[in-house]
Each structure stands twice: as C-alpha cells, then as structure tokens.
Image: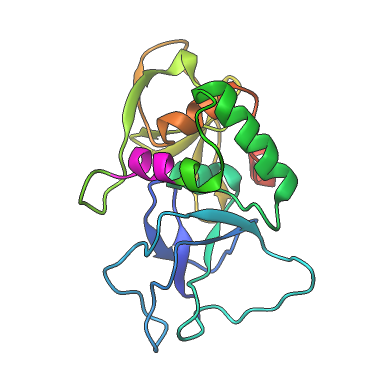
C-alpha cells in the first residue's frame, strides 16, 4: 500500500505509488503506524538524496527513524525547498554550494548556514505553508516551478510542463513575458541562474 511520503512542488506530502528519482529527509514525521501527523519538518536540514547508495537498505517509515520522502525529480525537490545531500551526492552538493555562493553572495560558509537561509526562503513565518514569490517568466531558468491554472508547471526551454506525481504532461507554450508566481525558493532560482541544472525526470524530455 502506498505511503504518504511523496512530495509535490508545492511542498505538500501526498500518497502515490510512484516514488521518483530522489529520496529526501526532514526528520521523523510519522508515527508507529506509518501515518503522518501535523508536522511537516523536525529540523531545517531538508536534503535530497539518491535512492541507492553504498548498498544501504531502509524500510520506509520504520518507527523512530526518519521519514523517507520521495520526489519525481530534483526540480521538484528544489521547488519543495530541499537541497542536494552532502554525503551521497557530494559532487552535486559542491556544485550547488558554489552556484549558491555565486548567485546569492559568498557569505554562506557551509551546509548549516545555507540551510538556515533556505529555511527562511521556503516557508512563511510560523506557518506550514510554502513561501512563494513573483517574477517575470522571461527571467526564470530551466528547472524552476511556477503556479499555473493547470497546477505546478516546470519551466523548460520555451515550454511549460505540467507536473503530476507520475511524470510531466503535454507541454504548454511558455509566454515570452509576464508576471508569474514562482514556487521554487528565490535563492534557489538565483543558484540555477548561476549554473546549477537539476536532474529532470525522463518525461520532461518526451
């Protein structure tokens, strides 16, 4: 039976059978019966990990162990407010950190500093809701997510790709300009503009 541990670009956690390309962690969110409570994080270190690393095995939602979260791809993980794991994705983390510093200033010393800044950028104060911002769609890099009437859409070249838990839908034309609501946190957008390209699900290339 599918568990409630699939993350959307709006940072909600839903039930779906497709796991996706990456796994994440926000701490222990489930109870002894593998049910989520009201908490959606237990610490600010939201990471996106490989689903296989050094032969390690986990049983999802084991009691008193962190809640395994799953993302369709890295663009979804970034939109939800996660960043590359510094252990299982060391090279990606180093590239992400370098691009973050280039795009946002080099005051961040490491993962703890970055996580504090990212935590403020992804959440509204004292609430469990995603913080969003507005931007001209012409300025957004590939890999960004926006809110549209069709639901969350991935910016990809001259197209917008509607997201679903199992993959991206038929492409829409990307407008040349216009103000849109951006789901991906603002400093992550700056990191993408500085050259960090997230891993996309194969349906984005269809």
**Percent position of residue 8, x then y:** 44, 52
Q: Is residue 186 visible?
A: yes
> Where residue 71 appears, x then y in whole percent?
55, 55
Q: For residue 142, say whether it is visible.
A: no
180 or 88: nearer the eye?
88
Left-right relation of 58 to 146 = right
Q: Which residues are magenta?
A: 116-123
User: In which quadrant of the rendered image does the C terminus lie?
Assistant: top right
Q: Is residue 132 left or right of residue 24?
A: left
| Residue 166 in the image, given as x and y percentages of width and height | 56, 56
Give the colouring mode of the picture.
rainbow
Residue farthest to the top? 176
Q: Residue at x 51, y 23 (%)?
A: 105
144 vs 107, nearest the viewer: 107
Q: Residue at x 49, y 41 (%)?
A: 114
In the rendered view, tell whether residue 118 sits above or below residue 6.
above
Q: Which image quarter: residue 168? A: top right
Q: Which residue, as the protein is rendered here, is positioned at the far left?
A: 126
Residue 122 part of the magenta segment: yes
**How many numbered dots are placed on residues in this image?**
0
Q: Residue furthest right?
A: 54
Q: Is residue 41 left or right of residue 95?
A: left
> Residue 190's x, y, as percent?
50, 24
| 170 and 52: which is toward the camera | 52
Dividing the picture into quadrants, the one containing residue 39 is bottom left
Location of residue 189 with respect to 24 vertically, above or below: above
For the stretch drawn in magenta, the main secondary structure is helix
Q: Is residue 113 above or below residue 25?
A: above
Instruction: Identify the residue at horizontal 39%, vertical 88% (top origin).
Output: 33
Is residue 124 magenta-colored? no
In-image side of 44 versus 57 (left or right): left
């Amino acid at each position: 039976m599918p568990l409630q541990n699939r993350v959307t670009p709006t940072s909600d956690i839903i039930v779906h059978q497709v796991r996706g390309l990456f796994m994440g962690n926000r701490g222990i969110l489930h109870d002894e019966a593998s049910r989520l409570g009201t908490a959606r994080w237990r610490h600010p270190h939201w990471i996106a990990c490989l689903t296989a690393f050094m032969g390690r095995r986990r049983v999802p939602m084991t009691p008193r162990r962190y809640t395994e979260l799953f993302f369709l791809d890295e663009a979804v993980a970034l939109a939800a407010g996660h960043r590359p794991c510094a252990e299982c994705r060391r090279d990606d983390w180093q590239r992400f950190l370098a691009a973050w510093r280039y795009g946002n200033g080099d005051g961040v010393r490491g993962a703890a500093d970055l996580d504090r800044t990212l935590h403020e950028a992804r959440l509204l104060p004292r609430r469990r809701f995603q913080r969003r911002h507005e931007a001209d769609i012409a300025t957004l890099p590939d890999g960004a997510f926006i809110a549209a009437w069709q639901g969350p859409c991935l910016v990809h070249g001259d197209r917008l790709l509607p997201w679903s838990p199992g993959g991206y839908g038929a492409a829409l034309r990307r407008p040349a300009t216009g103000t849109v609501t951006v789901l991906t946190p603002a400093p992550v957008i700056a990191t993408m503009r500085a050259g960090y390209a997230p891993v996309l699900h194969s349906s984005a290339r269809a």
